[in-house]
Amino acid sequence: MSTYIPTLIQLSYLVASSCFILGLRYLGSPQTARRGNGLASIGMLIAIVVTLLDKSVLNYEMIFVGMILGSIIGAFSARLVKMTAMPQMVGLFNGFGGIASALVAVAEYLRLVGSTEVIPLNTLLIIFLGLLVGAITFSGSLVAFGKLQGLVRGSPISFPFQQPFNILLVLGFFAGCVFLSFQGVNFPVFVGLIFISTLLGVLFVIAIGGADMPVVISLLNSFSGVAASIAGFLIMNNVLIISGALVGASGLILTQIMCKAMNRPLSNVLFGAFGTGDLDAGAGGVGATDKSVRSIDAEEGSIILAYARSVIVVPGYGMAAAQAQHSVKALADQLEKRGVDVKYAIHPVAGRMPGHMNVLLAEADVPYTQLVDMDDINPEFERTDVVLVIGANDVVNPAARHEQTSPIYGMPILDVDKAQNIIVIKRSLNPGFAGIDNELFYNKKTMMLFGNAKDIVAKLGSEVSQL
């Protein structure tokens, strides 16, 4: 009977992998996302149980201690971390995946050093690759977390000869790999490879502007999957290979989708230093003091909304920062009671991570059917009575269509300016991540409601309910 155990283990891994694949498929739609998450969880449970029952596991005590500590940390994090900090948490998760894979590579190297005089070349290459990708993912994710959290300056950080220095680091890493491949064990050189890999991750992300952090988070997610897949090849674990490849591929596809949504190639995202956070008149920006805006109060805004036939809500990071999603849902409920047709326009790169707005609105129980993607909602703006923009900036800036000197020129935007009336809720006229002024604010159809998004939307809802 024992001869069938390896086969049963591999079959169980196949079932777990199938759950991952189906779960990922269901995650592609909001209606089936919960089912997909459940399937993926079942697949992970199968993979963990089978691995623990495998006779190659030597220390159950340490594994269970790690599981308990991880569960406690995860439970507290889920309870304490606000939805506005979800992009930062995703960044940290990517980093944890990267460091786990890098540690597997380090541990395998140390194990082989102690058990054999000559490490096979193919094994060494996998170790080096796992170390490189894992360490870059870890340190890069920490920097991305720091930028999103405000611990690191959001604008690109550069220094003279930065790219040549990065190239020298890469060449140094490969030189170290060649040396270890032919000269055998050398711990100082191996530690040097760890240091170079980690430094490359830091230098890779600090040079990218805050406007591109959503793309970076998605790309690092892909890296974490690739690192996990490499670790799977290293320890000969099929389910880790498959799941890592799935994460790597899906993360890369999402990165490409977001680059397309900004009409920019990935190379420009990584090396374009986009999103300085400063006004730049030469880049299509106009200082807020150069033009006047039309300002209204909540009472006026509520009348305009209450007597509209159709309203499109455009959420942005300002809504997330103010935690206004529940107030937005309450306002929408009041409008729908009056027979107003309410929809939500979702731009692919709104917020600070892919799907940020979808997650926030889903938390507030906004029906999935009311969330409409950019391509589908854009034709409707021309026949919409009122558009309510809540904290969105660059994704509604008309300069993207015609201002060739603007850094967002060519980026597909929500055609908010084509609506009959536009109400914009913002704290001030400060620019968004791209660091440029927004033409929409000065449009003759635009009315500005200045203040905290949560408070303003709550006042709008209260006023509408009394009309």
Image (cartoon, rainbow, N blue to C red):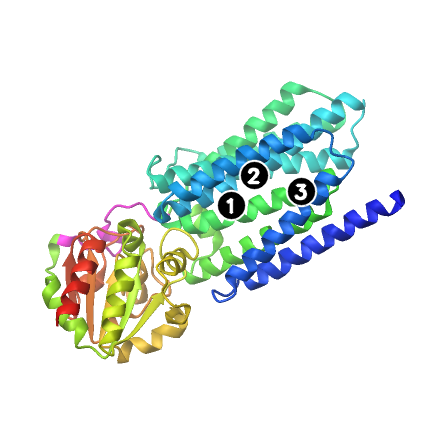
Residue position marked by numbered label 3 in the rendering:
230
Task: State how far apart marks 1 and 3 are (Cα).
Answer: 15 Å
Task: State how far apart marks 2 and 1 are (Cα).
Answer: 9 Å
Residue 33 image point, x, y percent: 51, 61
Residue interval drawn in magenta: 274-288
Residue 188 forms part of the magenta stretch: no
Q: Is residue 69 left or right of residue 114?
A: left
Whichever of labels 2 and 1 marks the residue nearer the N terminus, that label is 2
> Residue at left 24%, top 75%?
337
Location of residue 369 (image quadrant): bottom left
Looking at the rendered image, the quarter that the C terminus falls into is: bottom left
Residue position marked by numbered label 2 in the rendering:
98
Marks 2,1: beta carbons within 8 A: yes
Residue position marked by numbered label 1 in the rendering:
220
Whichever of labels 2 and 3 marks the residue nearer the N terminus, that label is 2
Residue 110 image point, x, y percent: 70, 24
Q: Is residue 199 visible?
A: yes
Location of residue 324 (image quadrant): bottom left
Task: State how far apart marks 2 and 3 are (Cα).
Answer: 11 Å
Looking at the rendered image, the quarter that the N terminus falls into is: top right
Q: Judging from the image, what secondary structure is the residue with disc 1 in? A: helix
